Amino acid sequence: MTNPAYTNLDRDFLILLNDVARLLRTRFDQIARTRGMTRAQWVILARLSRQPGLSQNELAGVCEVEPITVGRLIDRLESRGLVERRFDPKDRRVRRLHLLPAAQPYLEEINSYKEAMALEISEGIDKQTQDVLVDTLLNIKSKLTAEGSSPKLQMAGE
């Protein structure tokens, strides 16, 4: 049953999805700042832990930012001794990004915050409902990232 306190706007699926994503980003921004870092730097560390050896351009594509932005973030992480650039043995023009051992405590902290956040936001939501939500989000992601997918939108009245 729909809570009468909600307006139609409060239950708009796309707006709600965007709001939740924004709130999560804001929360992680706040946590990262308390550690003298940015959420973007945390994202890079986490991504490189899962995909070591990405190039700056590949990382920019995954993070959906411009390569110059990733370059600046990597410069800061490199100056802190957390990341290093290594020449690609197959193409000396390309530098591959690798985590250094000093990044490990940050990764542990990131994972700890991520687990705590997951527990906090899933409190009171049973496992079956969580599984349905994850499956639904995976379905949406698949549709949005499908090869050759393009918007099939029509304006009202067309």
Image (spheres, grey):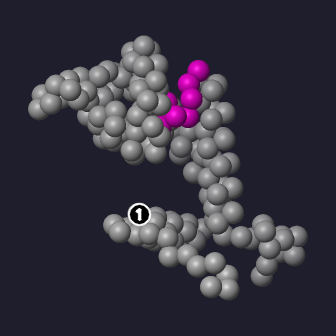
Q: Which residue is mark 1?
A: 145
Q: Give the answer, above or below, for where 66 lies relative to 122.
A: above
Under mark 1, the amino acid is Thr
Q: Quadrant of residue 138?
A: bottom left
Residue 58 lies, in percent from the top left, at 33, 41
Quadrant that contains the C terminus: bottom right
Is residue 17 rendered to the left or right of residue 128?
right
- Badge 1 density bin: few <14, some 14–19, many ≥20, Cα 10 Å: few
Evaluate whether residue 11 shows in this view: yes
Q: Which residues are magenta?
A: 36-43
Q: Position of residue 145 (x, y in %)?
A: 41, 63
**Residue 155 located left or right of residue 56:** right
Instruction: Please name whichever residue, 20 or 58, is drawn nearer the observer in this view of the structure.
Output: 58
The front one of 119 and 156 is 156
Can residue 46 be seen here? The reply is: no
Q: Please give the name of the residue rendered at 39% of the width and 45% of the height, measured from the top-left corner.
A: 62
Q: Residue furthest front?
A: 158
Q: Nearer the viewer, residue 132 or 119?
A: 132
Q: Quadrant of the N terminus?
A: bottom right
Q: Is residue 40 magenta?
A: yes
Name which residue lies at 55% across and 75% down: 153
Q: Main secondary structure of the magenta part?
A: helix
Determine whether, in the image, residue 42 is placed left or right of residue 124.
left
Q: Residue placed at 65% from the left, 49% from the top? A: 22
Residue drawn at (34%, 67%), measured in percent from left and top?
A: 147
Q: Position of residue 70 (x, y in %)?
A: 43, 31
Above or below 72: residue 137: below
Is residue 100 in the magenta section?
no
- Residue situated in front as seen by the camera: 130 or 52: 52
Picture quarter containing residue 104?
top left
